[in-house]
Image: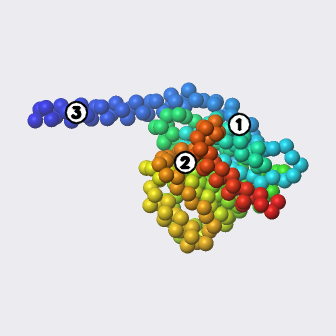
Amino acid sequence: MRFLFRLLRGLFVAVIAVVAALFVSIPIDGFLNRGKVETMTNTVIPSSAGNVNAFVVAPQTDQRLPAVIMIHEFWGLKPEIIGKAEALSTEGYLVVAPDTFRGQTTSWLAKAIWQTIRTPRENVNADLDAVFAWLVSQPNVDPERIMVMGFCYGGGTSLLYSLHNPEVAATGIFYGNVGVDTSELTKLSGPVLGIFGEDDTSIPLEEVRAFEAGLEQANIPNQITIYQDKGHAFVKSIAEIERDPVQQQAWNEFLEFAETHLKDGL
């Protein structure tokens, strides 16, 4: 009995120590990464929830462009997203990659989860409303051809924002959370692309299939692809996309979707 008591006490102390370490290390991680987002952004967009820092890139042209709002993963805004934004702009789009975590970025899982759950959805929508309004105000942007897309957290956020804003022309979801009430999908006003990994344990295939069925029932044009033997977040940096045929296939699928729904007829 005494041995069991000591074992339980030891486990309790260990759990308390781990929790304490997490709470201490999260602000330390924030301090170590302080200022990194500002070095990656080049535009400040006013929002009702506070200014939004964003990376904006566009090709040199006199014509009005379709635009894409590219939302980062739950790590926050990172160089991999900047690289994808730059690559996408060469295809003929003005691309905005906003920082929805207000300067927070990390490579540590616990901090990524923390900054995701502590960011209110209403603040994210307010920030994206500001980004969308800013795009509409730009003379080189076609306001009827604005797409929202993202990866992981950004994919799920793209879906939620498109449900919030009926002016979104199209939605792109790379392995984002699609566990929404399917009756809400009638609020979507544009086509949806969904790219998922068969082995993704964080996005159950049952939810993906239910989402696809809900889109069909709501008569929303959609293109849902499940990549075999791929887990979560399998489309990485542009350099890795160029080296890996499967990542390249997924990226090209997105490019073709955007071309069809944002540029055809221009």
For disc 1, the marked residue is: 41
Q: Residue 172: horizontal and vertical position, in percent?
A: 63, 55
The chosen color scheme is rainbow
Name the kind of residue labelled 1 in the image. Thr
Inspect this view and state whether residue 231 appears: yes
Whichever of callouts 2 and 3 sits on the residue coming sooner in the sequence is 3
Q: Which amino acid does label 3 sit on?
A: Arg
Query: Disc 2 to disc 1, how far (Cα)?
Result: 21 Å
| Above or below, 215 relative to 16 | below
Dot 2 corresponds to which residue?
A: 152
Q: Which amino acid does label 2 sit on?
A: Cys
The residue at the point 64 percent across, 58 percent down is 171
In the rendered view of the protein, which quadrant contains the N terminus? top left
Q: Mark 3 points at which residue?
A: 9
Could you tell me how many numbered marks the image carries?
3
Q: Can residue 120 be seen in this view?
A: no
Mark 1 lies on a secondary structure that is loop
Q: Residues within 10 Å of mark 3 (few under 14, many from 20)?
A: few
